[in-house]
Structure formats: structure tokens, C-alpha cells
Image (tube, rainbow, N blue to C red):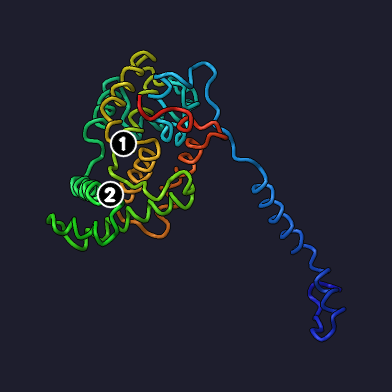
């Protein structure tokens, strides 16, 4: 039967003949089904480090702080301080986006990320209030409890509600996508500094690729970033959650819409990979405490 022929809905044979005639529809359906079956059956890709550098010593532990940003560019294996994945096109992008036109530009950018850290005072205060409240309560504060604490501290009620909703939305999405086994219910964002600190570590390696410093200097910078930044976090998951939230909040200016997380929070997959032992994730093998 020709695809455009009329179908007699009262005749089962006519209906079956028409369905068989729609071969192109079944071909498309078959391809789609096959794609999802293959994706479902294939194991998640493993994290592949560089064989030229350690994955277990202190230097590996320190550079692992930059894993999410190094993966996001990407600029090479997470444990390679030379950022070998950066080619001429990436070098131009880094120069344009970060203003890296000299050695001093490189050092100034790292210093900025280590000190100012993309901070916004109202956000810092609100997150600290939540952390303090969690200590007092012995659990993660509920939405109303956190919002009330911000208002009682002098914050605007409307702004407080918007901020609390944004942070809790990000946490919920990361937990749902990465899995509760990776991001447990008691994990919450205490600071947004993770984003800037992860960038600072990656930036130290990019400077080597750009010719602004050598590996030894990059290692020294990365060590300092860890010493000064790590005490604010309690675990790799704590840090990774902070990185994702910091990235989403910074680039969205705190305005979280339906598509915001899909666009800016895609690093959840890197967090999951980093924390999964079967995928050779560095955070699953390395201790948070140095």
C-alpha cells in the first residue's frame, strides 16, 4: 500500500498493511532505540592520567584541586602541570578571555583568584549564616530556617528567597544527576570559592603551556593555592559542589532559570567521574587532607 493511501480503520489487515508501509518511520525509531541501548550498555569513560606524572603523591593531590577546570577546558590529563592539551587556538582563547598577554598578567590573574575569588559580599554572608546555623542545629537548615536567618541578619526578604532558591536548586540538580552516593543529603554549599580556586590551579598549568613559567614555579603556585584555600572545605565533594555552584552563580549573576543549570552546571559529570573509583577518578583515590 502506498504511504499516502487511505487506511480503513475498520479493517485490521488494512491497518497492518499501512503500518508495514511506513518503513521510514520504523527505521528512524530503530536508530533512536539502538542509540539509547548502546549508551545504556556502554560503561562510562575512565579518567586517563598522564603516565609521565604521579597520581598518588602530594603533588598529584594538590593539582587534583584543579581537576574540574582542567577537564572543562580541556587542557590535558588532570595530573600534567604542562597542560599539553592547549594548542594554538586554545592559547589565543586564553589570552583573549583572561587577558594573558604577559607573565605578569598570568601571575596577577592567579593572585586575584586566590584573594578576591569572584566573591560577592551578600552571597558570602548568606552562605556563612547557613553554615553557622548548620553547626548549631547539627543538620542542614531547611529553606525557611535559612531564609529567616538571612532576613534577621538584615538581608532583604525577596533577595534572600531568590538566593536560597538558587543555591538549593543547584544542589538538588547536582545530587540528582551525579547521584546521592556521590553527593549525599547532608552535603551543601558553604562557599562559592571552589570555582575560583579550581580555576587558579588550572591557570597555573596554563602558564606553563603559554611559556610564562616552568613546572617548578607552577607547582609552587598550586601548593600555595591548596594551603590557603583547602581549609574552607571538608571533602572533595564539598569542594566540587562549591565549584559547580560558584560557576553557575557567577555566570548567571544569580538568576537561575529553567535552562541555567543545563547550560552552566554541566560539570556535574566531571564531579561524578572524579569521585568514582571504577572510572579511575582521582578524588576517589586521593585523601582530601594533605
SS class, disc 1: loop
Residue 204, percent from left and from top: 35, 24
Residue 20, percent from left and from top: 83, 68
Q: Quadrant of residue 233?
A: top left
Residue 227, percent from left and from top: 28, 25
Residue drawn where x is 14% and y is 58% of the image = 152
Residue 164, percent from left and from top: 28, 56
Image quadrant occupied by the C terminus: top left
Mark-to-mark CA distance, 2 and 1: 17 Å
Which residue, given by chain and number where applicable, does mark 2 sit on?
138
Q: Nearer the viewer, residue 206 or 147?
A: 147
Q: Nearer the viewer, residue 152 or 265?
A: 152
In the image, residue 15 sits, relative to residue 288, either above or below, namely below
Question: In the rendered view, does 192 fall on the left or right side of 208?
Answer: left
In the image, residue 40 sits, relative to residue 73, either above or below, namely below
Residue drawn where x is 44% and y is 50% of the image = 175
Q: Residue furthest left?
A: 154
Mark 2 vs 1, N-terminal side: 2
SS class, disc 2: loop
Question: In the rendered view, does 280 fall on the left or right side of 155?
Answer: right
Residue drawn where x is 79% and y is 84% of the image = 9
Which residue, given by chain and number where applicable, does mark 1 sit on?
233
Amino acid at each position: 500500500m502506498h504511504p499516502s493511501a487511505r487506511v480503513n480503520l475498520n479493517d485490521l489487515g488494512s491497518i497492518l498493511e499501512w503500518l508495514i508501509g511506513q518503513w521510514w518511520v520504523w527505521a528512524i525509531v530503530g536508530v533512536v532505540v539502538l542509540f539509547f541501548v548502546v549508551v545504556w550498555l556502554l560503561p562510562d569513560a575512565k579518567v586517563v592520567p598522564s603516565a609521565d606524572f604521579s597520581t598518588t603523591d602530594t603533588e598529584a593531590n594538590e593539582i587534583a584541586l584543579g581537576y574540574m577546570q582542567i577537564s572543562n577546558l580541556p587542557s590535558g590529563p588532570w595530573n600534567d602541570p604542562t597542560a599539553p592539551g592547549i594548542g594554538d587556538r586554545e592559547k589565543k582563547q586564553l589570552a583573549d578571555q583572561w587577558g594573558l598577554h604577559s607573565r605578569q598578567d598570568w601571575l596577577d590573574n592567579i593572585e586575584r583568584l586566590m584573594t578576591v575569588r569572584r566573591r560577592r559580599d551578600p552571597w558570602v554572608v548568606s552562605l556563612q549564616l547557613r553554615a553557622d546555623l548548620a553547626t548549631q542545629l547539627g543538620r542542614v537548615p531547611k529553606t525557611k530556617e535559612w531564609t529567616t536567618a538571612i532576613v534577621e541578619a538584615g538581608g532583604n526578604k525577596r533577595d534572600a528567597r531568590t538566593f536560597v532558591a538558587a543555591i538549593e536548586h543547584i544542589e538538588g540538580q547536582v545530587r540528582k544527576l551525579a547521584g546521592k552516593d556521590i553527593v549525599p543529603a547532608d552535603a551543601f554549599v558553604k562557599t562559592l570559592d571552589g570555582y575560583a580556586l579550581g580555576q587558579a590551579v588550572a591557570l597555573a598549568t596554563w602558564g606553563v603551556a603559554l611559556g610564562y613559567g616552568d613546572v617548578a614555579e607552577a607547582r609552587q603556585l598550586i601548593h600555595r593555592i591548596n594551603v590557603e584555600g583547602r581549609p574552607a572545605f571538608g571533602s572533595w565533594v564539598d569542594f566540587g559542589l562549591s565549584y559547580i555552584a560558584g560557576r553557575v552563580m557567577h555566570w548567571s549573576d544569580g538568576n537561575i532559570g529553567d535552562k541555567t543549570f543545563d547550560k552552566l552546571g554541566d560539570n556535574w559529570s566531571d564531579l561524578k567521574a572524579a569521585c568514582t573509583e571504577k572510572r579511575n577518578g582521582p578524588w576517589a583515590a586521593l585523601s582530601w587532607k594533605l
